[in-house]
Amino acid sequence: MSHSSRSTAVLCSLLVITLAAGGTACGGSSNPLADKPYDATGQVSLVGAEDGHKADPGKPLEVRADAGDRITDVTATDAAGRYVKGELDAGGRHWRSTGALAAGAHYTVRISTEDEDGAQGRRTIGFDTNPADKLLRVTFGPQSGTYGVGQPVTAELSMPVTDPASRATVERTLRVESQPSVKGAWYWVDNRTLHYRPQEYWPAHAVVNVSANLNGIKVGGALYGGPSKPVKLTIGDRVEAVTDASAHSMTVTKNGQELGTVPVTTGKPGYDTRNGVKVILGKESFVRMRGTSIGIAEGSADSYDLPVHWATRVTWSGEYVHAAPWSEGSQGWDNVSHGCTGMSTENAKWFFDTVRVGDIVKVVGSAGATMTPFDNGFGDWNVPWQKWRQGSALTAGKREGTSPADAARLRPRM
């Protein structure tokens, strides 16, 4: 290569480096995208929420371009990081929210603009919304603590929610996160009660965190969400008791390993023990059981009034696993109880000490009906998974690969 050629190459290289660093070649013009964004305060405005005024959360949020500039992007978030969906017109002159604002919240709106020459502008505006007059609160259950693998999560609402869209709004704010992660779903038991369970039982030793992102969210009409207290559940060992009413025996396992099998007696004809999966509701070292509590007339042939020890409750109507020393001759051979599962005092004490609230008690081989899901304790596991999923108010899944910011940052319509 000649000296002249080398010189030309060097000059060309220097020219490329200079342009890459933001310089200007002879006869060129600067790139407006490389310039610092200008202050667009005089070019765009936030309708009804500037100058310290609180905005009505029931009204849409609006951003307008006041001069020759056009709006290119609007992002609105509250202090909790929740995005507001919105729509920008094709000309870039007007942006309007399509999602509801939260009540009693602080918002930050970030607006991007572009002038006729392509220069980029920015403006950030903060404002507050008025608090709500009516608040929907949610109370989670059970209380924070350690439970068995069958323990459902409950959510009690402070007032009924009947509208399907409002139910979906509430359900989207409810969070159940477990380690390890499992598939689960909410089920609307009635207008004020939801239950959550995994497809299968909770994994042994899982940690479950339950919370709501409902505070300030518009539920419907003038009703907004209120604050809630989160709960944390620690799941213990997988302890399961299976009672075979036809074989008159109960087998207890822990993490898949058999702990023992004991002889029992269950409900006699007319008082057959309920089949299916039940969840332990509580433990009472002593309880007085009376026939009148289950509708047996006092003084009748089936009437009873007994002091009972080591009673583990599985239904609210009074079905227990308990010590029944008066029926030891029938245990392992015949069913003679009024619906409870009876065993010797020694075995009842062992069972009482082995299980905890939330553990599973399953009955098979009985002539009784299957445990109902919701009206007499936790029969949630007797609902098939596909039917359980139908109890959710959410019918559409999340769009894969779309972040909250991307979903909220809408572009001009074509």
Image (tube, rainbow, N blue to C red):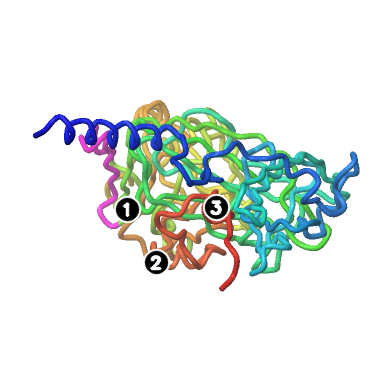
Question: Position of 214 compared to 397: left or right?
Answer: right
Tell whether position 152 is magenta.
Answer: no
53 up-or-down from 396: above or below? above
Name the residue nearer the viewer: 331 or 364.
Answer: 364
Of the numbered discs 3 and 1, the one sitting upstream in the chain is: 3
User: For this rendering, which residue is in front, 208 or 105?
Assistant: 105
* Residue 202, percent from left and from top: 38, 42
Amino acid type shown at disc 1: Asp
Q: Is residue 90 left or right of residue 243?
A: right
Q: How many marks?
A: 3
Q: The N terminus is located in which quarter?
A: top left
Give the distance between the C-alpha atoms of the residues marked 2 and 1, in whole angstroms. 37 Å
Q: Earlier in the sequence, mark 3 or mark 2?
A: 3
Q: Secondary structure at mark 2?
A: helix
Q: What residue sits right under mark 1 in the picture?
A: 334
The answer to whether residue 177 is seen in the rendering is: yes
| Residue in the picture at 44% in, 51% down | 337
Q: Which residue is mark 2?
A: 386
Please, which residue is most extreme toward the bottom here?
Answer: 414
Residue assigned mark 3 = 195
Q: Residue furthest left?
A: 1
Q: Position of residue 385 (x, y in %)?
A: 39, 62
Instruction: Name the amino acid, label 2.
Output: Gln
Picture residue at 61% right of the left edge, 34% below the top: 230
Q: Split into 4 quadrants, where in the image is the C terminus?
A: bottom right
Compute the Cα span from label 3 to label 1: 37 Å
Look at the magenta stretch and give its main secondary structure.
strand
